[in-house]
Amino acid sequence: MRGAWIATAALVLVACTPMQWVRQDVTPEQAIADEELCRQAAWQEANFRTLGYGPFGPWLHRDVFGRPLFYPPGGAFFDPYMARSFDESRLWDFCMRSKGYQLQPAPK
């Protein structure tokens, strides 16, 4: 039982490690500018597909007997994660990695 607590505590400490994007041949100002550019481009791309609308919830329809039926949303503009933040984070990560940055633990 004690070993499980130690493993859980170690996992929590590792999960809380702050991370930063690192590339050896850039100045800190250039790194901040690249990060902001990628963040803005990811936000625009994630919002372009949904046309600015939030996630759609389940649709309520009634059958011929008047019973409610809930249908999950679907189609070309459906976000399977129901949140644009996942898509935005994935696009931001792709942009930074394509510029040559690596995600590493921040120095203490």
Image (tube, helix red, strand yellow):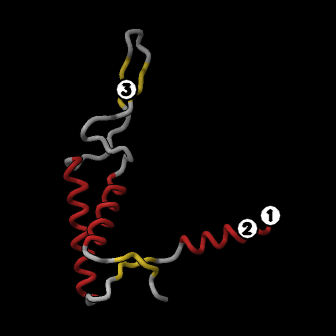
Instruction: Tell me the kind of residue under disc 2.
Output: Trp
Please tell me whether residue 43 is drawn above or below residue 108 in the rendered image. Answer: above
* Mark 1 neighbour density, 10 Å: few (under 14) some (14–19) many (20 or more): few
Q: Are the residues flagged by discs 2 and 1 in contact, CB closer than 8 Å?
A: yes
Q: Which secondary structure, mark 1?
A: loop
Q: Would you identify the image quadrant in which residue 86 lies?
A: bottom left
Identify the residue at image location x=29%, y=47%: 54
Residue that lies at the very extreme toward the top in this rendered image: 65
Residue that mark 3 sits on = 60
Q: Which secondary structure, mark 2?
A: helix
Identify the residue at image location x=23%, y=54%: 47
Instruction: Tell me the kind of residue under disc 1.
Output: Met
Residue that mark 1 sits on = 1
* Mark 2 neighbour density, 10 Å: few (under 14) some (14–19) many (20 or more): few
Q: Would you identify the image quadrant in which residue 73 lies?
A: top left
On-image quarter of the N terminus: bottom right
Depth order, front residue of 105/46? 105
